[in-house]
Image (cartoon, rainbow, N blue to C red):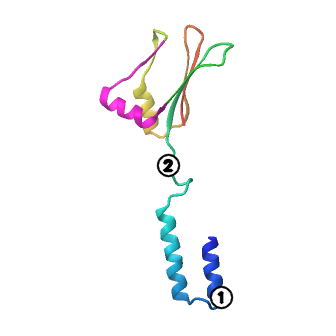
Amino acid sequence: MNENISKILKMVEEGKIDAAKAAELIDAINSKEKDEPSESKKPSIKMLKIKVISEGEDEKVNIKFPVKFIKASLKAFGKMPINIDGDKDNDIDLQAIADAIEHGIEGKIMEITTKKGENVEIVIE
């Protein structure tokens, strides 16, 4: 139970306030809590993360895009392929990624190995 509500109930028990005043105070507390979103209630910002990892190296590329940006870009420009080191065989269809986002899919959604042996991971978090 909320600490403030416990204090109000204690005041009623001690005869310091009546039940009507207690109900008024509890309503005020509850409405204030509804107006102030807690950290857990705030929507998290989903990110599209693209990592390129070369064999035997740390991350070569680590890019993060807000999902809302990807959606807006797709709406404005259509398909937005990402060309990896000029390798046309590895274009990434962001429309497919946007569809995954729309359906609420999270986690690693794509993993590609380029001709150069680089691993590309696409994750939605």
Is residue 1 in view from this perspective? no
Span shown in magenta: 65-84
Task: Measure the C-alpha gap from mark 1 to mark 2.
Answer: 39 Å
In the displayed structure image, the side of residue 98 where residue 40 appears, left or right: right
Q: Which residue is mark 1?
A: 13
Amino acid, disc 2: Pro
Which residue shows up at 45% across the image and 39% down it?
103
Residue at far right of view? 56
Badge 2: residue crowd in 10 Å (few <14, some 14–19, many ≥20):
few
Q: Is residue 75 above or below residue 29?
A: above
Q: Is residue 30 above or below residue 81?
A: below
User: SS class of the residue under badge 2?
Assistant: loop
| Residue 44, image x, y percentages | 51, 45
Which residue shows up at 51% across the image and 71% down it?
30
User: SS class of the residue under badge 1?
Assistant: helix
| Residue 52, image x, y percentages | 57, 19
| Quadrant showing the C terminus | top right
Is residue 6 in view from this perspective? yes
Q: Which mark is residue 43?
A: 2
Which residue shows up at 61% across the image and 73% down it?
4
| Quadrant showing the N terminus | bottom right
Amino acid, disc 1: Glu
Residue at far front of view? 16
Residue 66 among magenta residues? yes
| Residue 37, image x, y percentages | 50, 58
Q: Is residue 44 above or below residue 74?
A: below
